[in-house]
Amino acid sequence: MAVELTKDIYWVGAIDWQLRSFHGFATPRGGTYNAYLLIDEKVTLIDSTKPEFGDELLQRISEIIDPSKIDYIVCNHAEIDHSGSIPTIMKAAPNAKIITSTKGKVILERHHKQNWEYEIVRTNDEFSIGSRTLHFATIPMVHWPDSMVTYVVEDKILFSNDTFGQQIASWERFSDELSFDVIMEENQRYYANIVMPFANPVKNALKLVNGFECDMIAPAHGVIFRNPEHINQILESYRKWSNHESEERAVIVYDTMWESTAKMAKSIQRACELLNIPYTIHNLTTDNLTLVTHEMMVSKYVFIGSPVLNNGLMPQVAAFLHYMRGFSPKNKVGMAFGSYGWSAQSAKLIEATFEKLCWTILPSIEIDYFPDETELLALTETVIKNLQTDHKQFAHVNPSECELI
Ligand code: FEO
């Protein structure tokens, strides 16, 4: 069913309950493609859905108005999850005009190969649809070069498209109807896997967005924010993430061949416990690397381990490093570890990524064949000492008092 946000403004999008992978990242809670209908002198649809949800979109619009009465379709972003059902809408409303950015038009033409009528808008352009004014701001690279947001001046609603989105399939439409912790977890996961490489464009976008007084932020994915506290929190989170601020947390990521590297990971885990650093630990054979990327984004300390395999790394570790590097995470402390047989090589391969990302690098530790208890204890002690060298907050722990788990 369509859901009213405020008088004559409706959510008419689609819920993708089966979605488990979006854009390559894991979406255990499903997803949504939000579209919004504004009933005014000129009936306006903001964004659409993936192509396969076109009929669902049309049906929700029909609950409110005959779709042939749509005058404008605002396309904030031409990626196919938001423009995929525009052809369905255009068939139902052949006289509708598409409002988009210059680059949005280029991408829509490439995607859909149609001779639609366009109105091109730029930052600070305003457009009256009757009793309401649409104010546009382009936010290139959040997420694509064409991305823009639409602000309804009279209702103080920001339609932010991908920005502030989360992939959640839920009956509830507003952030105050669901657990805010779950929403923020999905928000972080979305930022980590989609938005993270575009930190500087996000900062520019936030300058524009902060200029709008928002009673509601309605993204194109996930729930709508109308609670002022939630609006402030989501804006603050984006500020923090775009400044590469992470938490005093650790993430230990590894793969293992004969459990030696797994044992080393446990020794590092012990060091984190003694230093009172909250951590998560992930074997990449069992844990989805896109979910681990989220933990990496929020953690200051990143430990990555692999045994040597054929003069290289275990494939899942290599994949994680490759994926992570694409996001350019900054301001982190990295440490490589791993076991080897006849030639220690994994640390330098892992550290090559740390160097590219300009991270602080703690001395790596590699152990040949199988680590014994003394070596594992020494590893815990060394990690503690290395963290204490540059991080005075850990000075209270005596490394020689470590015990194996
Ligand atoms: Fe939700 Fe960049 O598409």
Image (cartoon, rainbow, N blue to C red):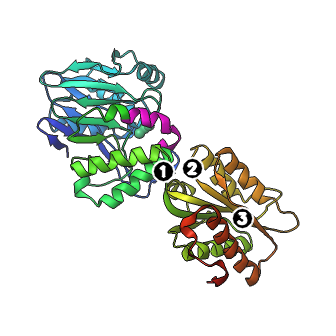
Name the residue nearer the viewer: 378 or 171: 378
Label count reads 3
- Tell me which segment is drawn in magenta: 195-206
Question: Which quadrant contains ligand 1?
Answer: top left
Q: Which disc, if any, is residue 245?
A: 1
Q: Amino acid at mark 2?
A: Asn
Disc 1 within 8 angstroms of ligand 1 (CB): no
Who comes first in sequence, dot 3 or dot 2?
2
Picture layout, residue 252 above or below residue 80: below
The structure residue drawn at horizontal position 73% and vertical position 61%, both measured from the top left corner, is: 363
Q: Amino acid at mark 1?
A: Glu
Picture layout, residue 159 above or below residue 96: below
Name the residue nearer the viewer: 131 or 394: 394
Q: Residues within 10 Å of mark 2 (few under 14, many from 20)?
A: some
Give the quadrant of the C terminus: bottom right
Dots 3 and 1: beta carbons under 8 Å?
Answer: no
**Where is mark 2, residue-wise?**
331
Is 329 one of the magenta-colored residues? no
In percent of width and height, residue 317 lies at 67, 57
Q: Residues within 10 Å of mark 3 (few under 14, many from 20)?
A: many
Dots 2 and 1: beta carbons under 8 Å?
Answer: yes
In the displayed structure image, the side of residue 67 where residue 121 appears, left or right: right
**Where is mark 3, residue-wise?**
337
